[in-house]
Amino acid sequence: MATTTRTEKLDLRLSKQAKQVLRSAAAAANRSVSEFVLESALSRAEETLADRCSFQLDGQQWTLFMEALDASPRELPRLKKLFQEKSIFENE
């Protein structure tokens, strides 16, 4: 992990059993409990956010995706009507 200045603190409550599991896992990974928890949490956070940043498609899915992007826009009468109305943010 890159060396950065740590200025923020995160506290959490956990059971005695959970703390022991974390201590054991940290020792097995040759890390402090803080390092182990931070690395594990950041890794999990990146996994959780990954599909919001990029996604993968096979050949058939890619073709369908590109066709959808290239398709003519659909007519949305309710949206058209909405844009014709005066905005609530406009002065009267």
Image (cartoon, rainbow, N blue to C red):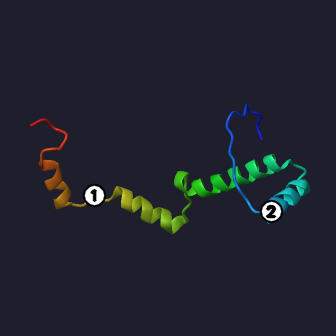
Quick one: SS at disc 2?
A: helix
Pick the quarter of the image with the C terminus: top left
Contact (Cβ within 8 Å) of mark 2 with mark 1? no
- Residue type at numbered disc 1: Ser
Marks 2 and 1: which is nearer the front? 2
Q: x, y percentage for residue 68? A: 37, 61
- Residue type at numbered disc 2: Lys
* Residue at the image position 74 percent from the left and 54 percent from the top: 40
Q: x, y percentage for residue 70? A: 35, 56
Residue furthest left in the image:
92
Residue 17 left/right relative to 59: right
The image shows residue 4, relative to residue 78, as above or below, that is above
Q: Which residue is mark 2?
A: 16
Residue 38 left/right relative to 45: right
| Disc assigned to residue 89 | none
Q: Closer to the camera, 72 or 92?
A: 92
The alpha-carbon separation of the residues under discs 2 and 1 comes to 59 Å
Residue furthest bottom in the image:
60
Quarter assignment of residue 72: bottom left
Q: Closer to the camera, 67 or 4?
A: 4
The local crowd at label 1, few if under 14, some if 14 to 19, many if 20 or more residues have their Cα within 10 Å, is few
| Disc assigned to residue 72 | 1
Quarter assignment of residue 18: bottom right
Q: Which label's residue is closer to the chain start, 2 or 1? A: 2
Residue 29 left/right relative to 4: right
Q: Closer to the camera, 17 or 92?
A: 17
